[in-house]
Image (tube, helix red, strand yellow):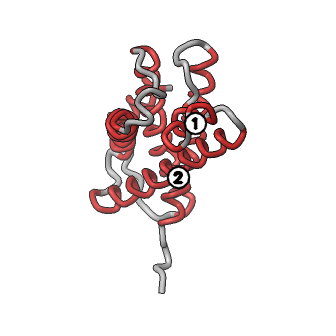
Amino acid sequence: MPERDDRFVLWLLCGVISIFVRELYSIIAKTIGLQKHLIWNIASGIFIDKGQVHTPLGIIVGFLGDFVTGGIIGFLYGLFLKWRGNQHYIVKGIVFGMATWLLVFGMVSHMLPLTSKELPRDALSVFSSFIGHVIYGYSLALIYKILFKVKNLHHDHHTKMEHSISLLIF
């Protein structure tokens, strides 16, 4: 029988909603010239040929890859907070975003032979991707706080340092 306060779906939801925030950043960054590719086009390039990335089905594949990854990261973030505690959850969220950038965008996707030619390699686009992943991690933490405050499943341990980080970012 599942626990009364089963958090699995809410952890996934934290990650998926945060992907929407990062997708919005990707649109803005591409529009103002900070990056050459939208994040879901990069995600679809992991799964399909370059010629199909910008097709309607290619965009859907990119979104699916992005949202599944976001949900998994949200789940891992929730597990980590359950294991290590909710203190400094904003810092932990930002670190999760940076780790995602390093592991998924940086290492895994650039190591795959079929995708290495499809991914941006110019410094501005890569840096913009880093910023997008930091935003993802920050929004992951905020959405976690909102969802779990509503559900009363944890105690809020918001620190002065995390408040300062919030003010700096937004």
Left or right? Give the position of 108 relative to 44: left
The image position of residue 71, as x and y in percent, is: 50, 53
Q: Amino acid at mark 2?
A: Val
Task: Work out whether residue 145 or residue 100 is closer to the camera in this orientation and state it.
Answer: 100
Residue type marked 1: Trp
Can residue 99 be seen in the rendering of this structure?
no
Identify whether 40 is placed above or below 75.
Answer: above
Q: Earlier in the sequence, mark 2 or mark 1?
A: 1
Q: Position of residue 120 (x, y in %)?
A: 46, 22
Picture disc at residue 15: none
**Quarter assignment of residue 161:** top left
CA neighbours of label 2 inside 10 A, class few (<14), some (14 to 19), many (20+):
some
Q: Tell me which residue sits at (66%, 44%) in the image.
A: 60
Q: Which residue is mark 1?
A: 40
Kindly identify the residue that appears in the image at 33 percent across and 36 percent down.
Answer: 111
In terms of secondary structure, where does tag 1 sit? helix
Question: Which residue, given by chain and number where applicable, does mark 2 sit on?
Answer: 68
Question: Which residue is farthest bottom?
Answer: 1
Residue 23, horizontal then vertical, whole percent: 59, 34
